[in-house]
Amino acid sequence: MEITRSGREQKVMLKHRFSNLCDMDFEFKEGKRESMLDRLSLKLRISRKELKLLFAELQTY
């Protein structure tokens, strides 16, 4: 069974896991999702690949 979590659920889970994240870190304008991902990877000090794995991991909780 595949579980798909909403962006809001993922945001809450990441904020619980990484206390240095805030709501502004997840904001992006239409078509600018890539810039948000770049910002998150910089703030968390992980690569984009690791960030993608982290989002995939959130789907299994």
Image: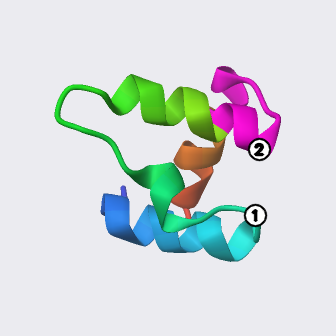
The residue carrying mark 1 is 20
Can residue 44 be found in the magenta stretch? yes
Please name the amino acid that badge 2 sits on: Leu
Nearer-N-terminus badge (2/1): 1
Secondary element at tag 1 = loop
Q: Residue at x 65, y 45 (%)?
A: 54
Q: Position of residue 35 (x, y in %)?
A: 44, 26
Q: Position of residue 56 (x, y in %)?
A: 54, 45
Most extreme residue toward the front is 24
Q: Position of residue 46 (x, y in %)?
A: 79, 32
Q: CA distance from mark 2 to mark 1?
A: 8 Å
Q: Which quarter of the picture shows residue 30? A: top left
Q: Which quarter of the picture shows residue 60? A: bottom right
Q: Which quarter of the picture shows residue 19? A: bottom right
Q: Is residue 28 above or below residue 35?
A: below
The magenta-colored residue range is: 41-51
Q: Residue at x 47, y 57 (%)?
A: 24
Question: Which quadrant holds the N terminus?
Answer: bottom left
Q: Residue at x 57, y 27 (%)?
A: 38
The residue carrying mark 2 is 44
Please name the amino acid that badge 1 sits on: Asn
Q: Is residue 31 above or below residue 14?
A: above
